[in-house]
Amino acid sequence: MLQKLDLNIDSYPSRRALGFYKLSDSTQNFAQKGNKTAQEAAAFYASTGDKLSDFENYKISDLAAEIMYSEQRELVVAYKPGPNIDFKA
């Protein structure tokens, strides 16, 4: 009777929710984050250049204050799934 029992546990969905990815998933995430970061950096440098080109009305100290105090913090409370458990008797 014990020979017909089948237990399958897939913990990858719960590990992925915690940030532990397979190699294929992590390379896709790194590529997407890299593209996003490059776009944000290009936009930041372009806007900084525009602001600094108006040097009569805009000071470097104004730019420093914007950079120091502009980051917003966010607390996220979310559900993390458990493993998929499949039991057949």
Image: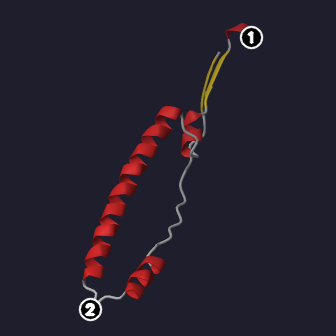
Three-letter amino acid code of the residue under disc 2: Glu
Three-letter amino acid code of the residue under disc 1: Leu
**Mark 2 element type:** loop
Mark 2 neighbour density, 10 Å: few (under 14) some (14–19) many (20 or more): few
Residue 85 image position (x, y, % from top left): 61, 29
Which numbered marker is on residue 56? Answer: 2
Q: How many marks?
A: 2
Q: Which badge, 2 or 1, is on the more N-terminal residue?
A: 1
Judged from this view, the residue extending furthest toward the right is 2
Residue 17 image position (x, y, % from top left): 54, 44
Which numbered marker is on residue 2? Answer: 1
Q: Residue at x 47, y 33 (%)?
A: 24
**Whether residue 1 can be seen here:** no
| Res. 13 image quadrant | top right
Indicate left or right for 46 with 20 as reference: left
Q: Residue at x 74, y 11 (%)?
A: 2
C-alpha separation, residue under disc 2 versus residue under disc 1 = 84 Å
